[in-house]
Image (cartoon, rainbow, N blue to C red):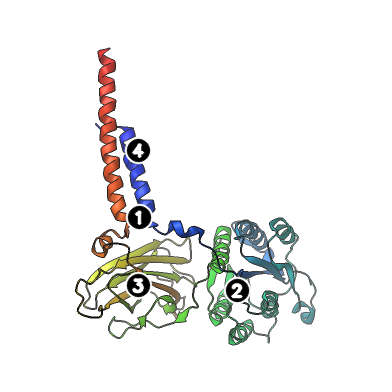
Amino acid sequence: MITTKRVTVGVCGLLAALTLGLFPGIAAAGEPTAQESPKVELVLDVSGSMRTRDIDGQSRMTAAKRAFNEVLDAVPEEVRLGIRTLGANYPGDDRKLGCKDTKQLYPVGPLDRTEAKTAVATLAPTGWTPIGPALLGAAEDLGEKDGASRRIVLITDGEDTCAPLDPCEVARDIAAQGIHLVIDTLGLVPDAKTRNQLICIAEATGGTYTAVQHTDELSGRVRQLVDRAATPVVTPVATEGTRRCEGAPKLGAGLYTDRETFGEHRWYQVDVLPGQELRASVSIAADRAVNRDYGVLLRATTTHGREIVRGSEAGDGRTDLISAGLRYPKAEQDDSDGKPAAETVCLQVSNSFSAPASVKTTPGMPVELVVDLVDAPGKASDAAAFGLGRGWWLLGVLVLTGFFAGLVWGWISRWRIAVWRTN
């Protein structure tokens, strides 16, 4: 007889085991952070076109303000955050004056959430779209390179209106200074020209581009980028996967960027030593209009084509970023005849995106591939089967404990009922 309490006991044991098995590094959460505080400047377009009402039934400006409030509530304590506007103050037709209309709304430093929210609340769609001057101003606001992570997050609904100061050239000039300042761009309901310009700005500095159609997408992506500044990864390295594993680029631990067209497969190689665990993840951004229902696949195989492990994820058009990951622990080498031999693992990145015939397939969609090699946690041959690292041993113990505890509880319950009926 299976009782509710018996099931509860078993489920609790299973949940506890999954928590420890899947997240063995939880105990390290209290480790000290870097001494230099990361710096982020949010650059918001407040030009006249932000009055357009096409984001969840409200104006683009209203959606941006709501997203900013949510982001400001969630900014990590260690982040030094500032806000700069463009097109917020000059309403006239003088192009020369309009193209100077960029101002720091809130200085980069420790965040007073109430003060920052109050400053954002006063904004109203006004003038031009001087993206180039705003990026130059934001770079100055963040100051000289001092060991801290520095990031500009640009949110706009249109392309720059102040040529010949091309914002893409501005981004390239910033990158050429070698100051390691990353610019991420977000396009609010972007058209093709805006999308191309924002992609160019982001790519010039190793940043990312995201198209936004809904308020929750905007707040979620900005929060993600601010968090990324708080926990920076290594500088992305451009690479180019091949059509087959043979001859594919050999990658070490790090962050890599590539591009992949619709339905394409790309291959990479990673050498894994005995006793190491390969952890890999891939993200593909749909930086243009795509059909609903798509997916991404990340496979690890031997050089002979035998699949080792895979990770996959499906999407339905609600977000323009989709990710998948995998883990592969390699067993320790038993013999001690010489230097341990590395195994070459083939990583395949595939996608099932499609798009209307009017959408360009080139350049390919942005791909971010993260590769990490760590000491394998426990017996690799068993861990690979479960994908849980050393935590799967605890999983088995707790599941069995929960099962037997449930049986004992059931027997006690039946005995108590029998005694009650007898009396």
Q: Residues within 10 Å of mark 2 (few under 14, many from 20)?
A: many
The location of residue 411, given as percent across then percent down, is 25, 29
Mark 4 or mark 3: which is in front? Answer: 4
Q: Residues within 10 Å of mark 4 (few under 14, many from 20)?
A: some
Q: Which residue is mark 4?
A: 8
User: Which mark is first along the chain, 4 or 2?
Assistant: 4
The location of residue 76, given as percent across then percent down, is 59, 60
The location of residue 170, given as percent across then percent down, is 64, 84
Q: Residues within 10 Å of mark 1 (few under 14, many from 20)?
A: many
Q: Which residue is mark 2?
A: 148
Label 1 residue SS: helix
- Asked if the residue under mark 3 is in contact with the one under mark 4, i.e. CB atoms within 8 Å, the reply is no
Mark 4 or mark 1: which is in front? Answer: 1
User: Which mark is first along the chain, 3 or 1?
Assistant: 1
At 61% from the left edge and 68% from the top edge, which residue is drawn? 37
In the image, residue 108 above or below residue 405: below
Question: 355 or 244: nearer the eye?
Answer: 244
Marks 2/3: CA–CA distance: 35 Å
User: Which mark is first along the chain, 2 or 1?
Assistant: 1
At 68% from the left edge and 75% from the top edge, which residue is drawn? 138
Residue 350 - label? 3
Question: 194 or 218: nearer the eye?
Answer: 218
Q: Which residue is mark 1?
A: 21
Marks 1/3: CA–CA distance: 28 Å
User: Would residue 352 be visible to someone looking at this image?
Assistant: no
Mark 2 or mark 4: which is in front? Answer: 2
Question: 423 or 325: nearer the eye?
Answer: 423
Label 2 residue SS: loop
- Asked if the residue under mark 1 is in contact with the one under mark 4, i.e. CB atoms within 8 Å, the reply is no
Quarter of the image that includes the N terminus: top left
What amino acid is found at the position of numbered circle 2 in the picture? Ala
